[in-house]
Amino acid sequence: MTPLAYIVSLPVRAYRLILSPWVGHGCRYQPTCSAYALEALEKHGALRGGWLALRRIGRCHPWGGHGVDNVPD
């Protein structure tokens, strides 16, 4: 993971550590949005990985999709 991607991943890691236990496990997608974001940042770096993570979070709403949504290669 690039240094910039690591910095961008810190809020995601903080969410998983602090807020995720309180929010619950009602995820519409598999893997969860936070796991997707970390994987996207790992594979594609800060810019493209961050964009993919934001797009995924934008799709996560009651009228959005569901099911398996893996990070593209």
Image (cartoon, rainbow, N blue to C red):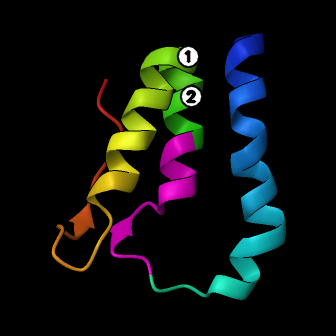
Up-down: is 71 above or below 63? Answer: above
Q: Residues within 10 Å of mark 2 (few under 14, many from 20)?
A: many
Q: Residues within 10 Å of mark 1 (few under 14, many from 20)?
A: many
Up-down: is 56 above or below 42? Answer: below
Q: Which residue is mark 1?
A: 45
The residue tagged with tag 1: helix, strand or loop?
Answer: helix
Q: Amino acid at mark 2?
A: Leu
Compute the Cα span from label 1 to label 2.
Answer: 5 Å
- Magenta segment: 27-37
Q: Residue at x 42, y 19 (%)?
A: 48
Q: Which residue is mark 2?
A: 41
Q: Residue at x 74, y 46 (%)?
A: 11
Q: Are marks 1 and 2 in contact (CB under 8 Å)?
A: yes
User: Is residue 35 magenta-colored?
Assistant: yes
Up-down: is 45 above or below 21? Answer: above
- Percent coordinates x, y for residue 10 in the rendering: 78, 39
- Percent coordinates x, y for residue 15 in the rendering: 73, 60
Q: Amino acid at mark 1?
A: Gly
Q: Residue at x 56, y 53 (%)?
A: 35
